[in-house]
Structure formats: C-alpha cells, structure tokens
Image (tube, rainbow, N blue to C red):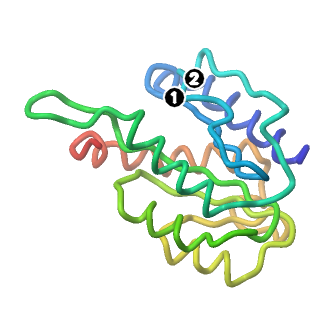
Amino acid sequence: MEACRNFICTIIATMRSDPFALETAHLSVIKFGGETKVAIPLNELCTFELSPSVFAPSCGLGGGLSQLVASIRSDLVPSIGIIRGDWRPNVVLWLTAEPTDDFEKGLRELESIKVGKRFAVVSGSVAKATTNRLKDSGFIVVSTESGDEPFCRSKEDAFKRMWDLSDADIDDVVNDSF
C-alpha cells in the first residue's frame, strides 16, 4: 500500500510541476477495496489532497469501474451545441491484488463511454489473464515487479512518460470532448 501511495504522490507532484496540468487537470480517487465509494471527489489539481485512508488491500475492481463510470457521467460537462464540454478523462488504475468481484461488468460499462488514455499499474498478485483482459480493453498496462517499461526508470519518469502519452493525444481530445 505504501508503494501505491508513494507513486500517486509522485503523480501529483509531477503534475503540479506542469503549468498546463495546473490549469486543466482535476483528480478524484475511487476506493474499491472493501466498500466501493468516491473517497476523494473531483478537485482541481492545485487543491487536491491525498488522504491515507483511501488505500485498502482488497480489490473490488468491477465495483470500482462501475463507480468510475457513474462519476464520469455525473461530474463531467458534455458538449452541447457550440458550448464546449470537458475533455475526456484519463483513467489510472493501481492494482495490488486479483479482482475479488466480477470486473468484466465494470469493464463493459467503461468501454461504453468515451475516456482518454487508460493506464493500469499492476503490482502484487495479479493474474496474467487479468492484465491481458485490461490490455484488450485498451489499458496501457505496466508491472512494477517485472521491470516492464516504463518502470525500468524511476517512478517519476514512468508517470512523466504516461503524461506525455496523454499530452500527445490532446488535439484529439480537444476536437472530441466528452
């Protein structure tokens, strides 16, 4: 859990050093260990505070993905006519265990809406079949155990590379908002 917390803190610090991210990024945390709930509601990056209570050892991934879809549908502003809506959100999952619920249902719900990039950072005992299913669903999956790219470098570089992948797609997102 400490590795997860440290990595998320690194993500936040990296984003806070980017002027573009400071102006555009909003973060939310959905807790899907045990009870699935929005642990930290959507906040601007500059006011986002990470609470240690959001981390839990179990992994109800399907419920977490369903909650994510519900949050996207309720929190994001769609484009209507000439009024531009929010950009499609990027999704970052951190899995530390094999899902304990039917995560296929949550994946199908996520596949039914438009999101930006999908990232899954896998550490711990997550089966190859689960990581392959995430890849099939459009996630960029990296493992902290196997030395997969981009984790061969520091965690800061890993997230910077993810952010660069997201940033490269920004023209598509601007032209295709939520």
* Tag 2–tag 1 contact (CB < 8 Å): yes
Q: Which residue is mark 1?
A: 26
Residue 53, image x, y percentages? 83, 34
Q: Residue shown at 23%/46% (left/top)?
A: 176
Amino acid carrying mark 1 in the image: His
Q: Quadrant of the C terminus?
A: top left
Residue 10 in the image: above or below residue 145: above
Residue 22, image x, y percentages? 52, 21
The image's mark for residue 45 is 2
Q: Taking 93 as reference, is 108 left or right? A: left
Residue 30, image x, y percentages? 64, 43
The image quarter containing residue 75 is top left
Q: Residue shown at 79%/48% (left/top)?
A: 154
Residue 79 in the image: above or below residue 97: above
Q: Taking 104 as reference, is 99 left or right? A: right
Query: Which residue, as the protein is rendered here, is positioned at the far left?
Result: 81
Instruction: Compare residues 160 and 173 and report the one nearer the observer.
Output: 173
The image quarter containing residue 49 is top right
Residue 131, image x, y percentages? 66, 75
- How far separated are the C-alphas under marks 2 and 1? 5 Å
Q: Residue shown at 76%/33% (left/top)?
A: 9
Going from N to C along the chain, the mark reached first, 2 or 1, is: 1
Query: Which residue, as the protein is rendered here, is positioned at the far top?
Result: 47
| Label 1 residue SS | strand
Q: Residues within 10 Å of mark 1 (few under 14, many from 20)?
A: some
Q: Taking 45 as reference, is 131 left or right? A: right
Amino acid carrying mark 2 in the image: Leu
Q: Taking 18 as reference, is 168 left or right? A: left
